[in-house]
Amino acid sequence: MTERIIPNHHIIEKLKLSNLAFEVDRVISVPVMKTHMYAGVTLSIKNMKGCLYQRDKTRLHRIKSNPPDIHKGKCLDYGICDLMKLLYPDYAILDATTCMEGFGPSGGTPVEMNMVISSHDALSVDLTAIQLMGMKPDAIAHLNLVREDRNLKIEDIHVHPVDFLKWSRKFRLASEQDLQQNYHNPSVVEKGACSACHAAMLQFFRYHHQEYENSPAVTIAFGGDLTAEDLHPADGSPVVLVGNCTAKFRNSTISWCKGCPPVPSQIVRTINAGKTLDD
């Protein structure tokens, strides 16, 4: 891994990336077509986050500054755009055979599209893909920012076959408001969590919340910005920490479920055991 300076950055001055991406002749992005709870979609452009050092992946979700223009995008959108100044793929092959809608990138519902989209230009692939997902070409903020940086016009993208939209369908999206779901038990405290932990929690509640409806109160806390004060809920319920970002509190008496992210079954076992889960 090497930390690299971003030329003409919008919001991030430098990022740590895998050296391998800069040592090969060609970089090909091969993502699966998915919606994303924060970025709208995760396609060829956002897929390049996979070349980032783990902590820098999370840092893109937790940029502590104001975006240059909130009307154009959030900090995450600008962060993805800055990543493209360092590592824009040479080719993109988008796997749209079995896709995902809803709470992507890992908590959504499969969608069968049975197609593959490819091009020497990753941005063109993504702009074509979102139209096949039932969105307008300007619907995704990070793609708009990259398009502005690269001066690409929608009308300059030529798709074969020209009637490709006959295979489009409307993908169900996940809004940020939908993430703030309230359950009687367990209750949730979240500060600074990335989409991976959010997806794990959504899956946990989807499949297991009914197991705790009539159980003693418990609070689940997750996210890298938690403070000690957050771990003392007003109702006095015991707290279960979820995710490696909360490890700084693991030596307390609070139960801790490690993982980045942990799977829902791990969270269940930690709650039921009432102690730190180490395996």
Image (cartoon, rainbow, N blue to C red):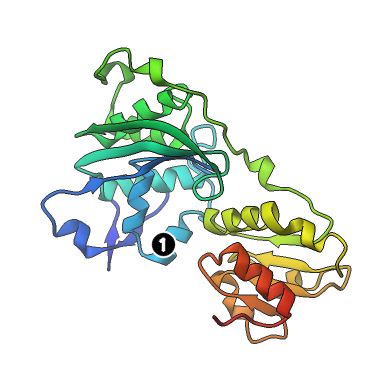
Q: Is 24 situated left or right of 58 in this image?
A: left
Amino acid tagged 1: Asp
Residue at image point 57% right, 34% down: 173
Q: Quadrant of the C terminus?
A: bottom right
Q: Position of residue 38 (x, y in %)?
A: 54, 44
Q: Is 132 situated left or right of 217 in this image?
A: left
Residue at image point 72% right, 73% down: 271
Secondary structure at badge 1 equals helix
Instruction: Answer whether residue 9 is visible to the viewer in this image.
Output: no
Q: Position of residue 7 (x, y in %)?
A: 27, 49
Total label count?
A: 1
Residue bearing the label numbered 1: 56
Above or below: residue 129 compared with residue 74: above
Residue found at the far left of this picture: 25
Residue at image point 71% right, 48% down: 180
Residue at image point 38% right, 29% down: 129
Q: Nearer the viewer, residue 90 or 270?
A: 270
Q: Nearer the viewer, residue 59 or 162?
A: 162
Above or below: residue 146 compared with residue 209: above
State which quadrant residue 213 falls in.
Answer: bottom right
Q: Position of residue 33 (x, y in %)?
A: 40, 38
